[in-house]
């Protein structure tokens, strides 16, 4: 017998932790049909035997089943269309009021619901009491106490959930609304009787009462029927003196209030919890940003400059430089392999891919830190802190969430922008998310910091804050244009209690991010390095086409030289750097892979110094930082570009985004090189004048007066829901 169970809950309720605990390694990750929101499902451990299987589907974290965000639409479409055998509704026991709002909607679907009250260890630690029996009676659902983090109550929960799923017993919601509301809903139920599943009549009736446009479209009731329903709604609105959606929201919270009063006892003497004490410091108006800067500096310092560098140097210099590459070279020569094939395998594939893989240790350490900060709850505070700043510059704190996700990979970061309701804010977030250094850019940062700045501790953290600065400045400039004018979207976010994440979850998150990078090295970067090796090894020499002895005569040199002049004002107008930057559009890791091929990665000088030193000789430090800034801010890799095109869903907006990113990168890089060179050497020329003019223009756009535009109208029902 096969059963399908949906896992639903608010963001930060512990849903991911519970899903991982129930499914372990039996997970399947993809996208929901037709959309780019991640879909996770897995086989529940202990219930996959011959003839019996229990599948758990992890729904996106949502606060309600109203169609305000794509996540909410995806979740409710699955519940209505797929009709799982049961729903596990995980709720945060430390914040019942907010979490039970979703519960009231889930119970209206007619699908069996079992409530998993998570973080009960924290509830008890806070000296608070929750009467499970009364909560079960008040909600009409089975209730189980759990601690997903510590694994408490998990086995009991899943046994009951599977049993409920097998019984397929339909449920009726335990809550009732005000008399006139129930009267109107009953009339709507009569009107749609026979048009929908009988067990879901109440849910559809409530949504029609709220004037849910998507439900109206799906049911195709006809204008006469809608007009009949509208009369009942208007009659209720007049009696309650409020709009329909606000009425339902208020009724739900009134019901939730009675539940909490009946079954939840808070401690009499109010004391600050540990989380509150920590938040009084890390979210302090004056201390929050300096603390954030110090945290990120330490993260990059350990990842890129100290521990990460030690591991990466060993991987580059010893593993590849002294062991793998010489062994491969000797082995191929010993079997009489053709020179061109030896060159392809050693100088192309191993050197190119190896140059990229050499930075995996640094990436894994960075991802380990970021996973820990996310798991303990600190990154949620950063979104809250950044909302204060972003709101002043025309963005919502919600915009920081995609940027946080983008530290791993720009593709899911761009896709995460779908949680932003305001279209203009969403477009601006899509355009700026990839300014944050992703995992693919970390090897570039590490290479520049190590090879050209002697491992200076300030280089890597500065790259992160250059991205933040680009986002803030872009927000200020773009919000003053007609295209993006308007108030930022409201920002509502739960701040979970601080807790130590489990080692398994941190390591799993680290590995998922790292493995994605390694897979790319084995596919896209492998193909790219083969093409780059061919282009740098073949060309016209002495009037004939073939393998060249001088790389300057290669196809790659010819192509790079043709466009290198464009980057001369930026300080790196040689063909090798130009080609590296261009190949970075395929995958940012290709920048390092290309340098690995062109500068002979793996060869060791007579004094034992790794050959990356020849790279340092081709750049000044100012030019190197200009190169770094350009690659951080310019158009992202092809995969991220594809995500931008899908999310924009408009060709003109797509090209505008790519054009803006590339132009901004060019302008900032030019200013960095020209002004930096002037300050360090005193050299003054046309480029310096151009840089000064661009800086003045940039400052004008930043500080010019903001023309007030028409404020965006937020319906009362929405604003009330936000306040609730």
Image (spheres, grey):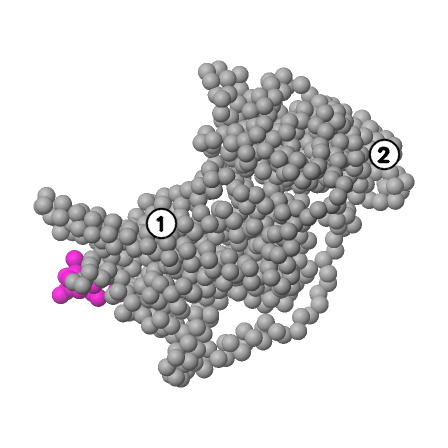
Can residue 586 be seen here? The reply is no
Q: Residue at x 64, y 34 (%)?
A: 120
Q: Residue at x 82, y 28 (%)?
A: 186
Q: Does the magenta stretch include residue 307?
A: no
Q: Which of 393 and 535 is in front in this view?
A: 393
Q: How crowded is mark 2: few (under 14 residues within 10 Å), some or many (20 or more)?
A: few
Give the side of residue 289 with respect to residue 329, left or right.
Answer: right
Residue 562: image location, x then y, percent: 31, 68
Q: Which residue is drawn at 49% across and 22% down?
A: 46
Question: Residue 704 lies in what quarter of the image?
Answer: bottom right
Q: How crowded is mark 1: few (under 14 residues within 10 Å), some or many (20 or more)?
A: many
Above or below, comparing residue 436 to residue 17 in the picture: below
Give the side of residue 334 with respect to residue 453, left or right.
Answer: left
> How many angstroms separate mark 2 from mark 1 (CA)?
60 Å
Q: Give the range drawn in magenta.
A: 540-558
Q: Secondary structure beneath disc 1? A: helix
> Circle 1 is placed at which residue position?
360
Give the side of residue 141 with respect to residue 608, left or right.
Answer: right
Residue 359: image location, x then y, percent: 34, 52
Circle nearer the viewer, 2 or 1:
1
> Circle 2 is placed at which residue position?
178
Q: Secondary structure beneath disc 2? A: loop
Q: Is residue 542 magenta?
A: yes
Q: Which residue is drawn at 33% across and 57% down?
A: 592
The quarter in which the C terminus is drawn is top right
Give the side of residue 292 with respect to residue 128, left or right.
Answer: left
Q: Counting residues from the N terminus, which is met first, the one under dot 2 or under dot 1? A: 2
């Amino acid at each position: 017998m096969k059963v399908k169970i949906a896992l639903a809950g608010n963001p930060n309720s512990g849903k991911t932790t519970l899903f991982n605990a129930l499914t372990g390694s039996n997970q399947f990750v993809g996208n929901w049909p037709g959309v780019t929101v991640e879909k996770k499902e897995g086989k529940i451990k202990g219930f996959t035997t011959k003839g019996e299987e229990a599948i758990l589907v992890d729904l996106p974290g949502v606060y309600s089943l109203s169609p305000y965000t794509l996540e909410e639409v995806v979740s409710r479409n699955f519940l209505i269309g797929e009709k799982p055998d049961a729903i596990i509704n995980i709720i945060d026991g430390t914040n019942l009021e907010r979490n039970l709002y979703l519960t009231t909607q889930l119970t209206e679907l007619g699908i069996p619901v079992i409530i998993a009250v998570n973080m009960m260890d924290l509830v008890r630690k806070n000296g608070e009491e929750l009467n499970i029996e009364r909560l079960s009676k008040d909600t009409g659902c089975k209730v189980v106490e759990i601690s997903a983090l510590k694994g408490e109550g998990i086995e009991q929960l899943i046994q009951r959930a599977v049993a409920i799923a097998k019984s397929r017993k339909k449920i009726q919601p335990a809550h009732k609304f005000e008399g006139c509301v129930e009267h109107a809903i009953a009339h709507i139920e009569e009107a749609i009787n026979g048009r929908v599943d009988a067990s879901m009549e109440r849910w559809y009736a409530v949504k029609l009462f709220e004037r849910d446009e998507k439900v109206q479209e799906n049911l195709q009731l006809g204008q006469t029927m809608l007009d009949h329903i509208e009369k009942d709604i208007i009659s209720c609105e007049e009696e309650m003196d409020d709009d329909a959606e606000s009425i339902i929201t208020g009724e739900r919270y009134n019901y939730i209030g009675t539940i909490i009063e009946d079954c939840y006892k808070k401690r009499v003497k109010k004391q600050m919890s540990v989380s509150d004490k920590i938040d009084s410091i890390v979210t302090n108006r004056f201390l929050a940003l300096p603390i954030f800067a110090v945290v990120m500096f330490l993260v990059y310092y350990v990842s890129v400059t100290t521990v990460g560098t030690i591991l990466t140097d060993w991987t580059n210099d010893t593993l590849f430089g002294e062991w793998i590459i010489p062994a491969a070279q000797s082995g191929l020569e010993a079997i009489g392999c053709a020179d061109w094939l030896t060159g392809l395998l050693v100088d192309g594939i191993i050197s190119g891919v190896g140059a990229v893989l050499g930075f995996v240790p640094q990436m894994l350490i960075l991802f380990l830190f970021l996973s820990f900060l996310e798991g303990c709850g600190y990154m949620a505070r950063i979104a809250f802190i950044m909302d204060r700043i972003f709101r002043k510059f025309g963005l919502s704190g919600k915009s920081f969430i995609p940027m946080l996700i983008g530290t791993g990979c720009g593709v899911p970061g761009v896709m995460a922008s779908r949680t932003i309701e305001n279209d203009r804010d969403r477009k601006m977030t899509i355009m700026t998310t990839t300014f944050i250094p992703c995992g693919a850019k970390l090897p570039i940062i590490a290479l520049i910091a190590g090879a050209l700045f002697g491992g200076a501790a300030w280089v890597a953290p500065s790259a992160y804050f250059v991205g933040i600065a680009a986002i803030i400045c872009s927000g200020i400039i773009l919000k003053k244009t007609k295209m993006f004018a308007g108030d930022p979207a409201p920002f509502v976010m739960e701040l979970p209690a601080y807790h130590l994440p489990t080692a398994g979850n941190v390591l799993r998150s680290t590995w998922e991010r790292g493995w994605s990078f390694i897979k790319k090295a084995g596919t896209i970067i492998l193909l790219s390095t083969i093409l780059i090796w061919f282009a740098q090894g073949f060309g016209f020499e002495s009037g004939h086409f073939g393998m060249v002895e001088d790389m300057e005569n290669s196809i790659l040199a010819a192509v790079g030289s043709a466009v290198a002049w464009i980057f001369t004002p930026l300080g790196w107008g040689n063909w090798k750097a130009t080609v590296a930057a261009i190949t970075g559009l395929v995958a940012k890791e290709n920048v390092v892979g290309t340098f690995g091929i062109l500068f002979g990665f793996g060869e060791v000088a007579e004094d034992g110094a790794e050959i990356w030193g020849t790279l340092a000789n081709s750049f000044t430090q100012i030019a190197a930082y200009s190169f770094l800034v350009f690659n951080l801010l310019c158009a992202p890799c092809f995969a991220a570009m594809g995500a931008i095109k899908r999310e924009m869903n408009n060709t003109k907006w797509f090209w505008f985004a790519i054009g803006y990113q590339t132009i901004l990168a060019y302008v900032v890089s030019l200013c960095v090189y020209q002004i930096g060179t002037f300050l360090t050497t005193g050299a003054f020329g046309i480029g310096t004048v151009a840089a000064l003019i661009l800086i003045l223009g940039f400052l004008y756009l930043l500080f010019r007066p903001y023309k007030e535009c028409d404020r965006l109208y937020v319906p009362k029902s929405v604003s009330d829901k936000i306040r609730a």
